[in-house]
Amino acid sequence: MMLHIPQVLTPAELNEIRQALERSEWTDGRSTVGSQGAQVKRNRQLPEDSPAARELGQKVLRALARNPLYFAAALPARTVPPLFNRYEDSEHYGFHIDGAVRALPDGAGWLRTDLSATLFLCEPEDYEGGELVVKDTYGEHEVKLPAGDMILYPSNSLHCVTPVTRGARVCSFFWIQSMIRDDQHRSMLFELDQTIQRLRARHGETEEALALTNHYHNLLREWAEV
Ligand code: NI
């Protein structure tokens, strides 16, 4: 399931992050990928262990922590600290697959990448090109979102970023290990959760909504790895 999560960041948070990124030093994005990725990746990133990346990454995590739609869709068990990248002057990232596991910082073990997230930090009209293209069994999906919005997509899909031919594309990106490993199960739980919420909004608390909530939690208990 691919999901657009609007307004993850407030305009004030966006401004703060953008200003901090303008003062930051960018390095070659090839430092964080394996050999297949290095052949097709042309962009810049904030160094993972730089104080700026750590501080801004924490800001993004705090914003996600207050976002119920993100929680319902991702059911996150653990998250790598968000990273930041920048594409300009025809930079791009050809079709690739994200690594299945990533080391967490400070020797905190490993994370299985179930979901990938891209949080857009500049407006679509500020740059030309730079679409995120995700391939799945339904074809190719092009994504370019307003500043502050985020796309979640399954990490097992091939994806690319098309060349940025004008302006600069700046985004935050990260990976999530979900409590629900299976994308199909996670999507079913998400649909059930959203339907229960709509039922409650329309009819208030009812016996039926309570029964479905019970069912949701029993499925979550059956499938969750925490
Ligand atoms: Ni990728």
Image (cartoon, helix red, strand yellow):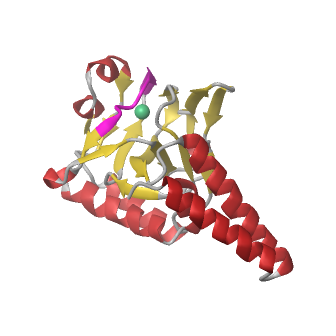
Q: Is residue 78 left or right of residue 220?
A: left
In front of the other: 217 or 160 = 217
The x, y position of residue 149, in whole percent, is 57, 55
Ligand 1: which quarter?
Answer: top left
Which residue is at 51% across, 49% downward? 120
Residue 29 location in percent, x, y?
29, 33
Residue nearer the viewer, 133 or 103: 103
25 is higher (above) or lower (below) than 38: below
Residue 69 in sight here = no
State how many labels appear: 0
Name the quadrant of the N terminus: top right
At x 22%, y 32%, the residue is 31
Instruction: Residue 143: give x, y in percent of width and height.
Output: 61, 38
Q: Quadrant of the C terminus?
A: bottom left
In the picture as drawn, the residue positioned furthest to the bottom comes out as 205
Q: Is residue 129 magenta?
A: no
In screen coordinates, is 69 left or right of 84? Answer: right
Main SS of the magenta part reads strand
Is residue 93 covered in magenta? yes
Which of the pair 69/126 is nearer the observer?
69
Query: The magenta stretch spans which residues?
Result: 92-101
Residue under the point 50% across and 53% down? 223
What residue lies at 44% left-to-right and 57% top-to-bottom?
76
Residue 3 location (% of width, % of height): 62, 48
